[in-house]
Amino acid sequence: MIDTLLVLLLGWIAGILINYLSDVLPTHRKLTAPFCPACKAPLTSARAFLSYALWPRRCPVCQKFVGWRSWLVDLGAIAAALWLWNRLPTPLDFGMAWVLLVFFGTVTVIDLEHRLILHVVSLAGAVIGIGIGTWLHGWKMTLLGGLGGFSIMLGIYILGIVLVQVVARWRNASIEGGEAMGFGDVTLSGVIGFLLGWPGILGGLLLTILLAGLASLVYTVVMLVLRRYRPGMALPHGPFLIASAIILLF
């Protein structure tokens, strides 16, 4: 019973951290005091922070609620923590997985909301990835995995830019955002490479392509049915890289 309550608490803390990092990093690129997403007022007092992070999730300045995303992230993090605790054999494994939960959650939320994979987040992920990857695969396979993931995705990134420019000129149109993917996807692939090692990153990238292709197909069909489809619409790639890493790691 005590273990379950502790895991629930750790899941809740993970959710709070993901929400906080997803709010401040896209704006400031560093750790700062949280602020209201609506009025941008800094929440520096203890009371304001508790209202922001715990309850009632309302800004004390403009009285607007923080938003439904914070509750969904909390619930998702708690559910993930419970699943990890019941799946992994030792508390050490759970501790490393909890760190990955915060990292993966932060990357996913920021990429879905802002179409960004921040370099400061990828840098932190590289430190985490090298540490955990070395524990799992040894330092040689870990570094090879990171180099392989970065290099392969860099090639895909450059090829994507060329193809987008060719198609844009041929159709006299443009792709939203100007690129098939962002450079943040390249750096994130390096992080995933550290975690999966070599040759695991090859399976990770292949699974990413399959998941992204399937999701894009479903998304395109839905948009066509709703008559909201526009040529060049693209999905963020970060969540699919994260999903492939989760599937192969756990």
Image: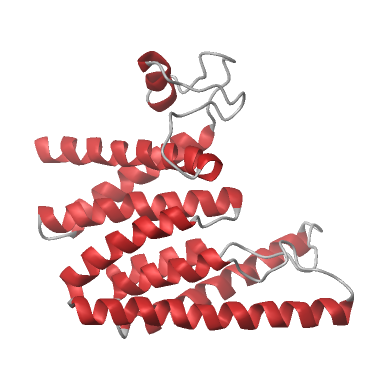
- Kindly identify the residue that appears in the image at 52 percent across and 49 percent down: 110
49 or 97: nearer the viewer: 49
- Kindly identify the residue that appears in the image at 22 percent across and 64 percent down: 131
- Kindly identify the residue that appears in the image at 63 percent across and 67 percent down: 218
Q: Is residue 1 visible?
A: no
Image quarter where the N terminus lies is: top left
Q: Is residue 114 left or right of residue 35?
A: right
Image spot of residue 155 (x, y percent): 54, 83
The colour scheme of the drawn protein is secondary structure
Q: Is residue 94 above or below residue 26?
A: below
Q: In this view, does 184 lie to the left or right of 101?
A: right
Q: Quadrant of residue 188?
A: bottom left
Image spot of residue 108 (x, y percent): 47, 54
Image spot of residue 48 (x, y percent): 43, 17
Q: Is residue 78 left or right of residue 92?
A: right
Q: Is residue 73 above or below residue 180?
A: above
Q: Quadrant of residue 213?
A: bottom right
Image quarter where the C terminus lies is: bottom left
- Kindly identify the residue that appears in the image at 42 percent across and 54 percent down: 121
216 or 44: nearer the viewer: 44
Q: Can residue 116 be seen in this view?
A: yes
Q: Quadrant of residue 77?
A: top left
Image spot of residue 183 (x, y percent): 56, 67
Q: Is residue 235 above or below residue 27?
A: below
Q: Is residue 217 left or right of residue 74?
A: right
Q: Is residue 67 above or below residue 27?
A: above
Total marks placed: 0
